[in-house]
Image: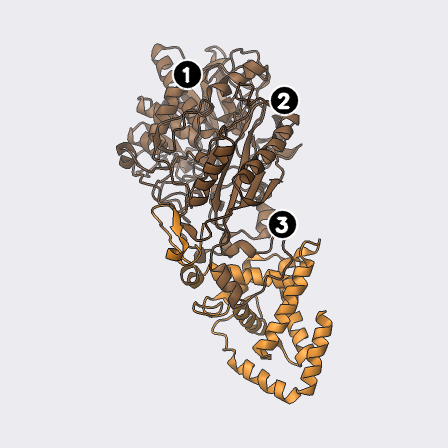
Chain colours: A brown, B orange
Amino acid sequence: MNGFAEVGVALRGSGRDSIKGAKRGADMANLNGRARQKNTYDAIVVGSGITGGWAAKELTQKGLKTLVLERGPMVRHLEDYPTATMDPWQTKYPRGQLPPDELNAHYPVQKRTGYTLTEYTRHFFVRDDQNPYTEESRYDWIRGYHVGGRSLTWGRQSYRHSPIDFEANAREGIGVDWPIRYEDLAPWYDHVERFIGVSGQAEGLPQLPDGQYQPPMEMNCVEKAFKAKSEARFPERRITMGRTAHLTDPTEEQLALGRTKCQYRNMCIRGCPFGGYYSSNSGGLVAAERTGNLVIRPGSIVTSLIYDEKAGKATGVRILDATTRQEEEFYADVVFLCASAFNSAWIMMNSTSSRFPNGFGNGSDQLGRNVMDHHLGVGASGEAPEFADMYYSGRRPNGIYVPRFRNLGDAATKRDDYLRGFGYQGGASRPGWDRDLTRPDRETSAPRGFGAARKAALSQPGPWVMGLGGFGEILPYEDNRITLNRDKTDEFGLPTLTMNVTIRENELAMRRDMQTAAAEMLEAAGFRNVRGYDGGYAPGLGIHEMGTARMGRDPKTSVLNAHNQVHECKNVYVTDGAAMTSASCVNPSLTYMALTARAADHAVQARKRGDL
Amino acid sequence: MLLSRRDAIRGLTFTFGVAATGFAGRALAAAPALAWTPTALTPDQARLVDVVAELIIPKTDTPGARDAGVPQFVDRALADYYNKAQADRLRAGLARMDADARAAHGDVFVTLTPKQQTELLNGYDREASAMQGQASDDDHFFPLLEDLVTVGYFTSEPGATVALRYDPVPGAYHGCVPLAELGRGWATR
């Protein structure tokens, strides 16, 4: 892996700001004023993923000299996507699947999704044996430590939270009230969508607000027919094209960054050589670098916030250099924690002082609590009754979407068996040559044959199959929590996390409806062999962990205020998934980015006023 | 079922021993010498995999497993990919094919006529499907081997680009295209 040695380099590797890591190993006792000045910035951003990239972009564009600290190695856009153009016959292993022994030895958690970790993507995921944690209950913590983080491997579905999402906790007496409403975030959603580029269809639905969209991708014949027939029977269940952070009609700004139209390769998770989808690496960090105000330092594990008791604020952060294993300090007027929900909480829990004996800003005891994800793995599938003579070309990295249609606030959509709701993501396709490979769920017991007839059959596409998979909201439960375990340390001697997260009656009742309603829609549309499924779900499998430092109105019951500032220390902002007060049922990254841009604007104004 | 059929075949071999040997000799002569050096397979096993892979995916109007380098792919999977249990199962399967061939026809699998070879594979396919859905579902070697040959073939360059259609950079998505215009399935999704 490159990167660890390249500390303090600019993103495109100009070397302009490079500082030799080997020469650092700063002896803290000798840290003089000049060294301190050298390590001082206007702002520090911890993490370089989807929110770290946004914080870096906004802060640098608004004139702040900004240091981005990333614990993993550098990943440069284009240069560091080693598998992006590999053909199927270029893999070392069959289908690019990693050997079972390697998965079991190094990736016992990362392999759990079944689809993310391959020979094509291995460098974008952590090795679990090097990044241990404790599962008091099963928690699938899927992550990657490198510049760009999971913005390289995310699902790219981009939906806004709706007014009912921001009001639900207060209305139902669940958790605490969001300190903001939809209107507070709407202009920042606009701002984010315009920059990252989201393709989608405006639908005019109150439960799924429209945004700034580039043209939607196309439905295939089966999806179009499904939409017509299902909506005729269930008009409240709108079927729309997935809203996804792919360019279908790039703006001048996006083209100027070196990004171009989605090429429908559907190899996004390897990194996109066209910049077709949004990542920190192709977007936010590039924009930040062009301001001349960005320094990014890979291989920098932030271990704690430095708190000045007299000043009553944070003065910077301590890091452990991943290569030299030396500690070092960096200083700034404002710190943004964008390290992911669990790692931002980890940094705060590990930042104890006489002011904060139970963790930074944790007077509420809410730090690490209220862990949420989206529960999934449940839905229905069926075979299309027509279009055997039709196919498609191109690999659309997107599917259809059915916005939430339960508990919208009116009697017609009210459920007595659970609160909140879910959306469906799905699509129709024709299975390929791999459709008869042995698998546990293979139903037929007829011999599959071999020879010319089977070869000819597999050279043709299989029958159309349509699937709908639910993404359900998980309520915030105080005892769904992560805690710091000082007795079990990682390879750097740092404390690890212990997970204790489960889903409850509300989620289980919702899952039953998620399965039933999907099957109803497929049956109404005339699909054959419709089968509901619930393949089970373990917390984390949605890869949407959030809630560990929630926003709220009251410092006694929440960690962050309405601007993502730590209630008890206003110059520290937390803007990743940790901030979420409730989960909604939509994919969260767009909201994280909007919260980050809004918080960065607040920080810049507050700093100007001298309020930090 | 397989046993009784095998007994019947053995009876035939006994009765028409001379003729059968003649066929076997021709089949062996028809199997080309290996043009590559196996690393995980023995040379005999490699010749067997070469013949079986071509029976599973034969050359038709498009290349077969042999032309697509599938035997080498199987050898690499054994060397780099499979764990010990999988490798043992595959090697045991290869040994069983030769043992069954000897029992039925008095010689190793690669020497049999294509018809005899196909008969044996049909038997394995039926055995495996009868085990499908049972706890020992994946214990039969034949699906393991057939899966590997299938994957090796359709992810090879000839398999992906000639037997199937492959487009590394489609550039656009068209959701409703007559299958007749495309002719074949896509290699990747």
Mark closer to the chain start, 2 or 1:
1
Secondary structure beneath disc 2?
loop
Secondary structure beneath disc 3?
loop
**Does residue B173 appear to the left or right of A320 in the view shown?**
left
**Residue that sits furthest to the bottom in the current view:** B18
User: Residue at 55% of width from left, 17% of height from top?
Assistant: A169
Secondary structure beneath disc 1?
helix
Chain to which mark 1 belongs: A
Eye-nearest disc, 2 or 1: 2
Task: Tell me the amino acid under the disc marked 3.
Answer: Asp
**Residue that sits furthest to the front in the current view:** A232
Residue holding disc 3? A441
Give the number of the disc on residue A416. Answer: 2
Q: Name the one closer to the observer, A409 or A79.
A: A409
User: Residue at 60% of width from left, 47% of height from top?
Assistant: A105
Residue holding disc 1? A184
Q: Is residue A187 above or below residue A213?
A: above
Q: Is residue A415 above or below residue A512?
A: above
x and y percentages locating residue B84 in the rendered image: 63, 58
In contact (CB < 8 Å): disc 3 and disc 1: no
Q: Name the one closer to the observer, A74 or A113.
A: A113
Mark closer to the chain start, 3 or 2:
2
Task: Tell me the amino acid under the disc marked 2.
Answer: Asp
Give the number of the disc on residue A471. Answer: none
x and y percentages locating residue A483 in the rendered image: 61, 26
x and y percentages locating residue A18 in the rendered image: 34, 35
Q: Name the one closer to the observer, B20 or A337.
A: B20
Mark closer to the chain start, 3 or 1:
1
Q: Is residue A166 above or below residue B149?
A: above
Q: CA distance from mark 2 to mark 1?
A: 31 Å
Task: Tell me the amino acid under the disc marked 1.
Answer: Asp
